[in-house]
Structure formats: structure tokens, C-alpha cells
Amino acid sequence: MELSMVLLIPAVAATLAGIFGNRAHAAAAATLIGTLAAFLLSVHITFGPALGVHGRILGLAGWLSCDYLSALVLLLVSFVGFTATLFSLGYIGSAVKAKGLAGTARYWVRYNLFLLSMLAVPLLSQVAMVWIAVELTTLLSVFLVGFEDNPEALEAAWKYVVLTCMGAAFALIGVLILYWGLRTSGAGEFTWAGLTLAGPRIQPAFLKTAFFFILIGFGTKAGLVPLHTWLPDAHSQAPSPVCALLSGVETTTALYVILRLLPVLTWIPGHPAGTWSVSFGLISAGAAAFLLLQVKDYKRLFAFSTIEHMGIILVAAGLGGGAAHLGATYQIMAHAVTKSFCFFAAGATLLITGTRKIDTVRGLIRTSPVAGISLMLGGLAIAGAPPFAVFISEFSIIKAGLAAGHYVIIGLLTLFIAIAFCGIMYQINKMVFGRPPEARAAYRLPATCAAALAVAAIPVVLLGVFIPAPLHHVLKLAAFALGR
Amino acid sequence: MNQLNALAGGLFILTVFGIVGLRQVIGCLRLFVMQSVLLAVSALILGIETGSIHLFAVAGLTIGTKALLIPWLLYRLLSHEIHARREIRQVLNIPTSLLIAAGLTIFAYFTVRPLLDINSSAFIRVNLPIGMGGIVVGAFAITMRREALPQLLGILTMENGAFMAGISIAPNLPLIAELAAAFDVLIIALVTGLLTRRIHRRVGTTRVGDMASLKEE
Amino acid sequence: MGAKILFNIVQVLVVMLCSPLVKGVLDRFKERVQSKKGPSIFQPYRDIWKLFHKDEVVSDESSWIFRFTPYVVFVAPIFVTLLIPVLTDYPLFFAFMGDMLAGGSILALAGFFATLAAIDTGNPYGPMGASRTRMVGFLAEPVFMIVFFTVSFVAGSTIPYIVQQAWITPLANFFEPAHVLVMLAFLMLIIAENGRIPVDNPSGHFELAMIDESKALEYSGRGAALMKWGGCMKFFVLLCIFLNVLVTPWGLADGASIGGLLLAIPLILLKILVFLVVLVAIESSLAKLRLFRIPEFMGAAFVTSVVAVVVQLIEM
């Protein structure tokens, strides 16, 4: 019941936003209420008694289901969805005013539909339907990426749709082969639970081929190197609240599908799925760390950081073992809350300075203390400085890897994290401190943007020093779902 | 029956090569329609052989969406000028890209070879490698073409390839998934078509392969 | 055995006598489709007759190759006729001498001599046409080879008589994808090899754009007649291979009776007539390709033949 409600809310909000048409405020209000409701409902699902007792909630005759891993993703999506709505209120208004764009109401319709598709990914239990949901997250966000309607944004949107649809076709054949393997091995439900159950009966060749294609396919969407080229473009050209959603949680939903499949393959001797994940993850983290060093655009900086984080999560999940898996789930959470905060900070900076170029932004802390402090905070948090959540998750992944004896992999990973840290902090430092270029007319950040920054900052600051016990419980059990 | 199916498969992969090699945009679109019809024919043959009602539905859906609705949609969305375009210079010259595409098809065959050793009816032996070839060569076409519409057709070709394999290996996938997938293909065409139209308006060209303002310096 | 030798002679005579007719019908058809009246279908006979009665002019600068070539060009298709099924579906007396590869190489020999002769005279257009013909030939060669491989892959032989049987026993083999695709590839080859549109325009009179025709520009009198006749026969022979071995392996004489043999003559002519309609349709609906686009055309033929092999491989 709750599960269908979660999906129903954004659908209703989208319809309302569509009906309100030109009355943008009403559409925005509907979205705000809707996302808040979805977030509260997700909190209820995640920490509520139903999941606590059974470890699993079923809804809508087996089409929807939710366990701890899905609950975690659901929680993150709805949280970022809510904060991004809050940020959009001021941001889109300013952007529309500044660039003379029409169609704010259309923005809200698309925003809600996009959110709906992302919420559907963790909740759907049929693997084929999950594929469709992931594909829809792309298709429904294309026009959000191209919202600014200038040649760069359209180019980014085109690359985004073409490359991710290409990936989706690869993933589709993977899903079909998975289904074939399941049928060949006898009866079984084509759901995540059914697959995990039937895993050892399926011939390894099917599983390996299917996993390979799904890794490539959804890996494209999660931004794994070498299929990442669309990601920095799309994540830098979209409006900042959309970037927060794309970078913070959309990549996570794509990765979620890959992670879901890992336990099905764990039993195969040599653990090929783990090996592939680790190698793809390492390559992504490494390439992103080096690409970070030479960006000229601060939104691209955060986009490359997303690629790096996806790589780290994949390495942790691929290495296996309870501790590494816990690190992976922790990293998923830390990434989602921190990265969305970073993009809000970047959006605030963009509103104030009107440029995306790192070189032209100096002394932000003097021009606008709110944006400057946010950007500094976000930079420190995402780069993995203590005492923020990313530091703890990366630290626990490194610790778990060392304990399990993967010295080379962890050594490389640590190196990449260090390089990325330097890259991010160097650029952020330049932007926040120093002498402002010239006295610009004072620009007041819209109140809702500041509010969004404040709300989004709470978990960023808090989760590094204190994790509530129920949340820790959820993370632990979600990590348990990654292994067998 | 097996021969007819193999014939449909052989012509299918030929149309996939056409998407890589044909210069005229409108020709590519026509080839795509032919390709979809061949996919429907294959689904129909498999449906008759296995008596599966799902496959008839797939055949009908394929004809309805891919052979009729999508071309109509693209005609309506995009101006005549986009369809009449020709690609004078592709990323690689055409004979080379055709050769690479032929190599990729053989590569695709070897990727699915281990699966065929485990379980293969006569239909799977034909449809799976050909579908896989369609996917791989379709992806190659996307990277080779510079025009927007052929790139879109490359995506749709990949989907067709996946379906070609799918009708043989997963003939009784839940019908709702099939319906949703057909719907999904339609949305791809709609979204990409709209985006192409917008690019055409704002940028003045649909040679998306030449758009390269976003990159690391 | 005597009957077989007789049949062989009949076969050669049919090829020699009917081939100009085929050319005439094709020309007439094409003109008619283009709303022109067109020459009589017997015009090629008249041309050849007229040329035989004219004096021959031979350049002083040319060597024996120039004089020798018309005979090679004339005789080569006749030799091939001995190897392939023109009227009968069983091997005749000389058929033991070679398979389809041998036939191909004999025709290639004629092409080789024609190329040499074109260079021999020093006429600037000759070498140009010769090099273009070679270019098309180089591109056509791999397709030829793969078509033959596919054929032998399916039929287990390259002897045309065996191949012909393999396609129709059982009849389902006729719908084998390898067969259909090989037919398609071979059709493209015939178009390229005979210099038809879209590769070359056989009725063009502009030397700079010629591919095939410019090689025979320097010939006059008897030499020109032999070259022309040889060209007609080559076309006829290739059509026989295409139709009798690949497309419609029916309607050939299967017994040793002379009646059956005579009945096969109108049947093959009818088949060719039907094919000419198709060819005219192709020629009238397409434009000639630029020279540098020809590799693309041949690339398409090559891919088609490769797909034939791949599909055959998959099905095994």
C-alpha cells in the first residue's frame, strides 16, 4: 500500500502541475507538497515496523517490493527530490527571469515525472520493469537537461540521450539473457528475490554474459569510464537542482541495478562479477581523478567527482565481504546527500556570479558568504575530508579492503582518492578565497535556495559525526543484501 | 519454417549494415521500416512454430509502433529538409565501416557462442547471434554517423536487435513488459525527435556529430 | 558420347547466335522504357555483320597483343560455355575440364588481355578505362571468391551442375538465406562486371566517363566485331550461370533426347527475357555512381556475401 502511494504522489503532482499550467506558483506548491509527502512516506517505509519485521514489503500483487537496499535508495531519492524542489523554487524563478525562458510549469511536470521514474526503480520487483524504469529516467530527464535551450545544453542533452539509450539496449539484451537462463534452469520468478534464490541453479555462462551486458549498459548510465563522456556534459549543462538529482541519485539508481545482480553471481568460482566490477570501478575512479585536475568549469568538477564516487562504490561492492559492502552502502548514502548539496552550492554560485568558469570566480566568500561557505563545505565534504560522511565511508572501504588483503587495489584506490582530493580542493580554494574580480552588484540569494542549502547541509554535517541507530541498522541490512 | 526465419534474419542483418552505410537519411528511415517488418516476420514465424500468443502480440506491436507509428511521428516532427539530408563525410569511409561492421557481426557471434552450446533450439541459433549482431553494429552505427536521425535509427536498430534475440530466448516474457518496451521505444523516438527538432531550430543544423563545444580542453 | 558432343556443339551455337539478340532486346527495352523508339532488336547482328566487312586499322605502335586480344575475348566465353549448364542439367562432354572457378578464371584471362590491349595502343583513353576496369575488378574479386565459398559451403562442391541440384533438393533449400543473399551479391557482381548502371553507363559516349567501353575504342573492322560479339557472349554466359545455377535451376533438359534439348532453348531465352526486364528496371531507376562511390557499391556486395557466409555458419 505504502509502496504504490510513493509512486502515486509524484504522478498526482505531475498531473496537478500540468493542470495548473501557467500558474507556476501553484505547480511549484503541488510539487513541494508532493515531494515532502513522498519523503515522509519513504521515511515511514524505511524505518517503519513493516520492513523491520519482515525485512521486505510487497505491494501491488508482487509487482512492487521493497527490502532494505531498495529502501535506502528510495530514501535517498525522495530526500534529494525534496531538497532539489526546494532549491528549484528560487533557482528556476531566477533562471527564467535572467534568461527570459517560458514554461516553468512544464519544468515542474517534467520534474515530477523524472522523480516518479527514479522512485520506481528501487520499488519495482520485476527485472524487466526495472529496465524500463531506468530507461524512463533517461527519457524523462532529457528535456530537463536541455532546459536552458542554448546550443550547449542541447548538445549535452543529445549526447545524454544517445549514449544512455545505447547503454540501455545493451542492458536489455543482458536482461533477456538473464531471463533465458532462469527459464532454462527451471521455474522461478523473474524478480530480484527470485533470481537470488535461483542463482546457483542457473548456468554460469548465462549469468556471466548477462552481467557483462548489464554492467556495460547500466554502467553507461552510472557514468563508468570509458562510457562516461556524456556525464560531465549533461551534469554541467542542466539546471543546478536537476544536476543534483542526476548526479546525486540518478547515477545511484543505475548502479543499484548492477549491485542487485552481484549476489546472484557470487557463487560462481573466481567471482568474475566481482573482478569486473572492481576493474571497471578502478578505471573509472582513476580516470575521473586525473580528469578532475584539468577542468575549467566547476559544475564539471563535481560531475567528474560523481564518476569517481561511482567507481569507488563499485570497487567496494565488487571486493565483497560484509565490511566492504557496508562501506559501499555508506558511500551510496554519503555520495547522494553530499553531491546534491555540492550542486546546490554550485547553483547558488552560478546565480551570484553568472558564470560557470572556475577562473572567473574569485573571492566568493566576500561576494556572498552563504554561497562561499556552502561551496567550501561541499568541496571538503565531497573530497573526503574528515569529519564528513564521505571520509568515513571511504575510510571504512579502505580499511575493509586492507583487512581482506587487497593491497594493490586499495593502494590504487587510495592514490586516486588523494589525487581527486587535491584536484577538488585546489579549484574550490581558488574560487572561494582570493580577491573578487570587481565589485558586482550585490545579489541576494533567493530565500528558498538558502533554505534548501540549509536543509541539505544537515545530513552532510551530521552524518560524519553521528549516525542514528535506525539508519545504521538500515545500512547494515542493505549491505547484507549485497552479499549472499 | 526454419529457413524462412533464417532468411528474415539474414535480411535483417543486411538492413542493419544499411543503417551503417547508407548516405541518404530518408533511405535509412526506409531501411529501418523494412528491418522492423522483418523482425515482425520472424516473430510471426516463431509464434506459429511455438504456438505462443505472446509472439503474435510482439509481431503486431512491432508493425504498429516501429513500422507505422515511428516513421509517421518522425515525418511529422521533423521538417522535410532533415529527411532529405545526405551525409557526405562520415567518421570513417563507408567501405571501411562496412568491413568493421562485418567483423563486429562475427565478434557478436562468438560472444553468444558459449550460450548456444548450452541451450539452443534451431530458432535461437539463428535469432540470438543475429540479434546480438544488430545490437553491436547498431552501436557502431551510432558512433559512425554524424546526422541526428541516423543516430536515432542506430538506437532503434539496437532495440530491434535486442527484440530479435528476445523473441527467441524469452518468448514468454510477461506481456506487460513487452507492451511497456514497445511504449518505451515510442518514447525514445518521440523524445529524440523533439530534441532533434529543437536542435535544428536553435543550432541550425542536425549534424550532431560536429557539435563539440563541450569537452575538456 | 556422340550425343553429348553434339549437345555441346548445340550449346555453343546457342550462345554464339543468341547472345547478340539478348543485347539487342536489352537495348530496345531500355529505350522503350525511356519513351524512345529504340533500335531493332536485331541491330547487334547488323553491327557485327557490318564490322566484319570493314577494313581493319591497326596502329603501327601496337604489338601482337593488340591483334591477338579479339580472338581471346571471343574464344574465352565459348570455353566457359563448355563448362556450365546452358541447356542441360547434367554435365556434357567437356564439363570435366573445370568448375565455376575455372570459368571465372577463363573470363578473367579475357579481361586481362583486353586490359593489355587497351594500354598497348597508346591511346590516352585506353589505359584510363583499363585502370578503371581493373579497379572494379579488384573490388569484385573478393566478392566473387566469397560467393564461390558460400556456394561450395552449402553445396559441398563448386561444379555448377552439382550446385544447381543442391539448391532445389529439397525445395526448402531454395529459401535458404545463404542462397538468397548469394543471389543478391551475384546480381551486383553481374552489374559491375558487365558495366551496367549504376557502376558504368554502357550507352555513354563520353570517353572520360567510360569504364568498360573505352578499352575497345581503338578497334575497327573484324577486331571490333569480335570484341563486340565476345562481350555479348560474356554477358550471356554470366546470365546463364546466374539464372541456371542460382536463381531458377529449373527448365533444363534432363534427358538425352534432342527434343528436350531444343525445348530448353526457348526456356532459357524466356528466363533471360524476364531477367532483362528486372535489369532494365534497375538501370532506369538508378543513376550512375561517381567513380569513387563504386567501392561503396562493391562494399555492399561484399557485405551481402559475407552475411551469406555468416548466416550459413550460424545455422550449421
Image: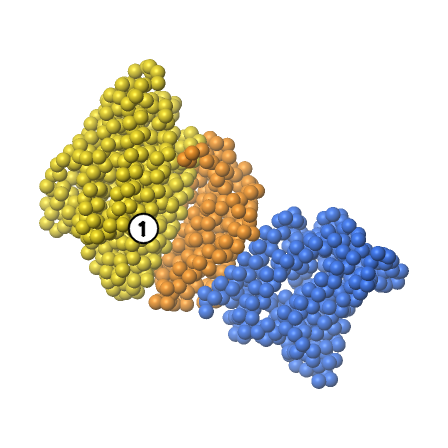
- Residue A427 x, y percent position in the rendering: 32, 29
Across and down, in percent, residue C266 comes to 71, 70
- Tell me the quadrant of the picture where the N terminus of chain C can be found: bottom right
| Residue at image coords 69%, 78% | C94
**Amino acid, disc 1:** Ser
In percent of the image, x 80 and y 65: which residue is there?
A: C68
Q: Which residue is mark 1?
A: A279
**Residue A332 locus on image (x, y percent):** 23, 42
Q: Residue C274 location in percent, x, y? A: 66, 63
Chain letter, colour orange in render: B
Q: Is residue B157 visible?
A: no
Q: Residue placed at 79% from the left, 66% from the top?
A: C71
Residue at 36 percent of width and 61 percent of height: B169
Can residue A414 be seen here? Answer: yes
The figure's colour scheme reads by chain
Quadrant position of residue A348:
top left
Identify the element where label 1 is drawn: helix
Chain C's colour is blue
**As displayed, is residue A211 above or below residue A354?**
below
Chain letter for mark 1? A
Q: Is residue C65 left or right of residue B217?
A: right
Vertical side of C14 occupied by A302: above or below: above
Which residue is more in the foreground, A317 or B39? Answer: A317
Viewer-proximal residue among A452 and A92? A452
In the foreground, B100 or C298: B100
- 10 Å crowding of disc 1: few (<14), some (14-19), many (20+): some
Q: Look at chain A in the picture and name its colour.
A: yellow
Number of numbered labels in the structure image? 1
